[in-house]
Amino acid sequence: MTRVYGTELTQIYELVHEGRGKDYGAEAEEITRRIRARLPGARTLLDVACGTGAHLRAFATRFEEVEGVELSEAMCAVARRRLPGVALHRADMRDFRLGRTFHAVTCMFGSIGYARTPQELTATLRCFAAHLAPGGVAAVDPWWFPETYLDGYVSGDTMTVDGRTVSRVSHSTREGTASVMRVHYLVADAALGVRHFSESHRISLFSREQYEEAFSRAGFAVEYVPRLHAGRGLFLGVRKSGRAG
């Protein structure tokens, strides 16, 4: 299942992560440091599945040129308002062609898990490689591995920002080789009262070995950094010389 958000749900998404205090700048700084440790002269970056552009905005202060790819038009609309002058492309991460290459490609927030099969995972990473110069770096924040995923996990948060209160509750269950996360929101403000929204996400539970094999098949030398991103870790792939894919 791909991420497709309506306008109001996109606003709620923004509010939730603002209220949770997610530190996009610190995450961007960590990934930038690791990219430049492998490619010191990295100046250009493409953020795939960039969402509303929160990470992209942080990367824009660290790279000379950035662009983004996002499937959801509602998300793109928010990102365009946030990042005037930055090229944002509405496209599927599994198959896009921008006609240029970058020094780095990033994919954050476990979005790579929206690839439905190992074959789609490989196709996605081949697409990343095709947009990297030789020696370029792909930094991918994975979803959970099968052995680290908590079946039945429940998460809940309530926050108030700018007069709007949001309560978010999610329940995640394993279905075959994927996790299905069902999320419910109660949203209240003085003008519109209380509303209810819900969404569902099917996110693949690829193993570390499957990720590493897909990176290798896509033409990367890959390493895994544990413990980052709430324990999901980080994959770093350096594109080998020669034609990508």
Image (tube, grey):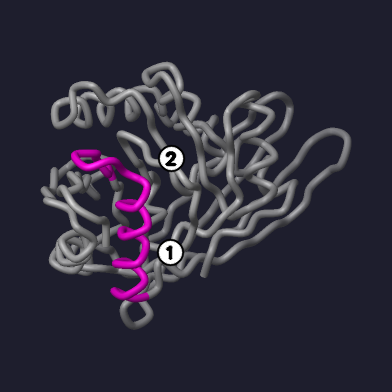
Residue 232: give x, y in percent of width and height.
24, 50
Q: Residue at x 28, y 64 (%)?
A: 150
Residue stretch rendered in magenta on the structure: 117-139
- SS for tag 1? helix
Q: Is residue 67 above or below residue 59?
A: below
Q: What kind of residue is marked 1?
A: Tyr
Q: Is residue 147 left or right of residue 194?
A: left
- Which one is nearer the viewer's eye here, 17 or 105? 105
Q: Earlier in the sequence, mark 1 or mark 2?
A: 2
At x 48%, y 47%, the residue is: 99
In percent of width and height, residue 22 lies at 43, 31
Residue found 24% across the figure and 56% down from its top: 243
Cα separation between marks 1 and 2: 15 Å
In the image, 170 versus 232, the foreground residue is 232
Residue 63 position, x and y percent, is 38, 21
Picture disc at residue 141: none
Q: Position of residue 29 (x, y in %)?
A: 30, 23
- Helix, strand or loop status at disc 2: strand
| Side of 226 relative to 80 (left or right) | left
Tell which residue pokes out farthest to the bottom in this image.
Answer: 176
Q: Quadrant of the C terminus?
A: bottom left
Mark 1, other Cα within 10 Å: few <14 / some 14–19 / many ≥20: many
> Per the image, is 142 magenta?
no
- Give the residue type that dot 2 points to: Asp
Residue annotated with mark 2: 47
Which residue is labeled 1 in the image?
A: 114
